[in-house]
Image: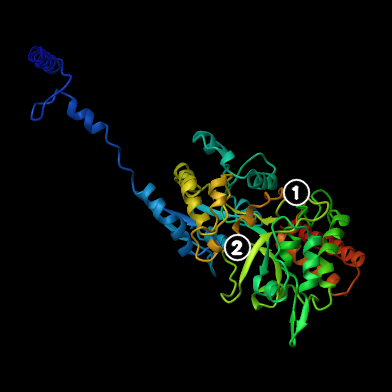
Amino acid sequence: MYRTNKALSLFVCSMLAVSLAACGGGSSPGSTPAPGDGEKKEDAKPVPKDPYTMTIFAPGVSVEELNTRFGEALKKKFPHITFNFTTSSAGNNITDLVSRGEIPDLIRTDIPTLYSGYLDLQLGVDLKPYIQKHKYDLNRFNQVFIREIEDYTRDGKLYGLPVPPFFPNVLYYNKDLFDKFGVDYPRDGMTWDEVYELAKKLTRTEGGTTYRGFTANLTGMLRDNPFSMPILDPEKDQLHAPEKWQSVFMNLKRFYDIPGNALKSAADESAAFGTGLSAMAANLHSVYLKIPNEINWDIVSLPTMNGAPQRVSQRGPAYWAITNTGKHKDEAFEVVMEMLSDEIQMKDALQGIPTTLANKQIQDALGKEHPIYKSKNMKAVSYYPPTDPTVKRKQGLIDIPLGNQQSFIIASFVDFATGKDDLNTVLRKLDETLKAKLAEEKEKKQAK
């Protein structure tokens, strides 16, 4: 029975082979292909793309960093493109490039420079048609960052997609000073009232050395305040919400009223933790922040303030934007998609760069392969979700550059914290300063 079945099988296979060959359904090695077969195989090959150079301009970021983070992945994905990463330098800011006709294909912009370094130069491209064409999912991102750029222009267009890093505020602490004075370490989820009590215990003078219980990056505490408040009112020519600014100023000033913890200047505050004499410092988590190796530090979540949302205030991200003079806009959008991919953002996160994505797995990977961050409490960075975007100035109203606004409010707080003026006086003067600057900006516009 077995031999009969085997013979039958061989017979059927032979007949099938003959039938397939007769119908052109197959060929054996060395056989002559049917007419047209060669042409069909040739047509199936991808058509090589013409090589060209794409220039990516990222002010404030080193070319070395850009190559490290994006270079290898882009070369692999787009072998026909030579990527020219450039950054700002003397004589090579974006206005210099535009004046010389050397306009990049992609620009790394941000909210403070979105107009001056992009839209006012008539370079803007709405990304929404490209998002629709490529079926690109904006829900990948933390929606705070999408709203941030949409709210700024209020014209229904989307001029950029958020690129890491962004800079969440956290509370740094010096473990050796806590150990020295027998005080329990801070923890995630604390309030400002609890941190204030710790600061009082840790502010002291011993052996002729003064130790400060608390210091802060004033820009991070004021510009990136827990209420997401603007400084200049979005709809009126005045200081926004003076009563809320009173609460922010008062919350922070009490730390500088602790004997031995007086504020000297904003610059001293930013540098204080690095001296090893500050027990706690409210500051941004940033891969660019360098803390001396001899300081035994860690972080916890930024304290929450009574009456404010339980969110973490932060300096928002930058955005990849396409320029309207580029000859390869569609492919430029594909390059942006690659630079914002899960794979690249995971690689960033492992090195301590917070992701702009809503992906919890990538968020939780923060710092796990960084030589310093891997031993730190990096979950503090995302312990609370980011605060809502700061409400932007109403379209059509004269605005004041954000850098000027920051300088004004920091100077006002320093005057208050150092006793130069009382709270009502500093806020009134701040309001007057904003109005004077607005008048100056209006004159500039009329003179054009």
- Element type where label 1 sits in the image: loop
Q: Is residue 362 left or right of residue 81?
A: right
User: Local crowd at mark 1 within 10 Å, few (<14), some, or many (≥20)?
Assistant: some
Q: Nearer the viewer, residue 373 or 347?
A: 373
Q: Quadrant of the C terminus?
A: bottom right
Q: Is residue 176 left or right of residue 34?
A: right
- Element type where label 2 sits in the image: loop
Whole-percent x and y of residue 272?
69, 75
Check disc 2 and report the residue beneath it.
286
Q: Three-letter amino acid code at disc 1?
A: Val
Check disc 1 and report the residue beneath it.
391
Q: Quadrant of the N terminus?
A: top left
Q: Three-letter amino acid code at disc 2?
A: Ser
Q: Nearer the viewer, residue 414 or 271?
A: 271
User: Label 1 vs label 2: CA separation?
Assistant: 24 Å
User: Local crowd at mark 2 within 10 Å, few (<14), some, or many (≥20)?
Assistant: some
Q: Residue at x 90, y 66 (%)?
A: 423
Q: Nearer the viewer, residue 222 or 384?
A: 384
Q: Which of labels 1 and 2 is toward the front?
A: 2
Q: In the figure, residue 378 lies in which quadrant? A: bottom right
Q: Is residue 128 left or right of residue 229?
A: left
